[in-house]
Amino acid sequence: MAEGTGKRYRKKKKYRINYWKAARALALLILVLTIVMSYLPVALGRGMSFDRKLIRPHGEIGSSDVGLKAKSAIMYSQDLDMPVFEKNADERMEPYSITKILTCYLALENLDPDLIVTASANACRELPDGMELELEVGEESRAIDLIYAAMMMSANDAAIALGEAVSGSEKEFVELMNKTIKKWGCKDTHFVNTNGWQHKEHYTTARDFAIITKHCFENEKLREIALTKKYTMPATNVGAPLKMENALLKATENLEGLTFGKTGSWSESQCSLTIGFEESGLSSIIVLLGDTARGRSFDPRTLIKIAHDVTPGFIVTDSDKNVCNTWVRHGVKSKVSLDTKGLRYAYPKNQRAGGVRVKTEMEILKAPVKKGEKVGKFYIYANNKEVGEGYLYAGEDIETGWLPSYLYITNRTTVFAGAVIVLVLMLGFILHKIKN
């Protein structure tokens, strides 16, 4: 203790930095961070989602004259649950035999398919014209066979027999038909028979019948029957087996994308048609009233051609480049951009891009990767339903990388990280020598 002061002095301890050890620790840290930052995104599956910026609006509702032969028509989007094209859609007209889709729908909903239906005198009454099974009074047929006959060959007596089997009489069944369509919201439709036989009080509109078509073909069995090419009705107690072919497929000349439907006619110049079709993510119903036999073959094709242009929706892919990417192991680069081929659409009910979901399925690739190589698939969803799919293709060549690329460290990252580590070690070594 110094004289005259009451303070004690201590010698401060000096800390010496070992620059060489510090440099080695920092170099190791850089190496670990490089590995973790390169491998962690792969482990978490990041960077593999579809580029949503590519989803862009398309389509606008229209009602211009496109040269239809039909006097009244409508195209109803099942995706949006609304009409997207109309021509005199509220004009009351005769539906003819497309009436039978409601008869067959109610039969499927209310009868056991194997129920034996006995033909009545009313069902067997002779009509001036039209298709018939030529049932005899007392003839016994299965309900399902009568439904096939009513749908495929438009048998009038089969439709009457079905109505009577459901309700006990044709009159009561017609009341059920009208009650059902009123419940569905049809305001300008009234039926007086089960088969569409011409009558001034038997009418509908294209708008109403699109709604009727929509509800009837929610029955999967009816959809199946509507597209059955050939069917053999087994022998009855009085009749031989009967082979029948689908009148709808003949009338529409095997229209591509057809999902269901039914024809109707009174003559070559008085025809009707209701169909459903799907095409590139679009699902719609077309109803044609007051058409001709020739017109109902061409009119659906005319409307299908403009369907995407008049239905508000989104283009999801259009031969796009770099729609997403996936990881590449042991490559010069750790990711490869992916492309698609072909035009695909989606039609969400909320008419917003957020209503479109794209799911991708890809495996982690191993270099080398060749441009154009098929490397995965994508699935497009709208309204919780898959509406499109396609393949993903490599958008560039990826050559084999150096040894660190097994850990998804690119050649460029290897060079950069390696250079930094070397510089850190050199600096640490130099400072260590200077201090010593």
Image (tube, rainbow, N blue to C red):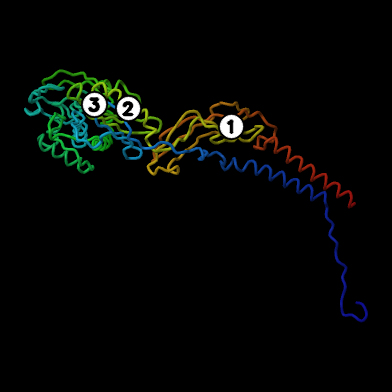
Image check: 72 left or right of 130?
Answer: right
Q: Which mark is residue 291?
A: 3
Q: Amino acid at mark 2?
A: Leu
In this rendering, does residue 48 appear at all?
yes
Q: Residue at x 56, y 34 (%)?
A: 322
Q: Which of 259 and 284 lies nearest the eye of the viewer?
A: 284
For label 3, the crowd category at 10 Å Cα-Cα, with few meaning under 14, some 14 to 19 and many 20 or more, is many
Image check: 105 left or right of 164?
Answer: right
Mark positioned earlier in the residue sequence (2 or 1): 2
Residue 71 image offset from top left, x and y in percent? 24, 29
Q: Which of 58 and 139 lies nearest the eye of the viewer?
A: 58
Could you say whether the residue bearing mark 3 is in a helix, strand or loop?
strand
Mark positioned earlier in the residue sequence (3 or 2): 2
Q: Amino acid at mark 3?
A: Asp
Residue 382 image offset from top left, x and y in percent? 41, 39
Q: Quadrant of residue 293?
A: top left
Residue 331 image offset from top left, x and y in percent? 65, 32
Could you say whether the residue bearing mark 1 is in a helix, strand or loop?
strand
Q: Which mark is residue 258?
A: 2
Q: Amino acid at mark 1?
A: Leu
In this rendering, does residue 221 appear at all?
no
The residue labelled by disc 1 is 365
For label 2, the crowd category at 10 Å Cα-Cα, with few meaning under 14, some 14 to 19 and many 20 or more, is some
For label 1, the crowd category at 10 Å Cα-Cα, with few meaning under 14, some 14 to 19 and many 20 or more, is some
Looking at the image, is mark 3 or mark 2 nearer the viewer? 3
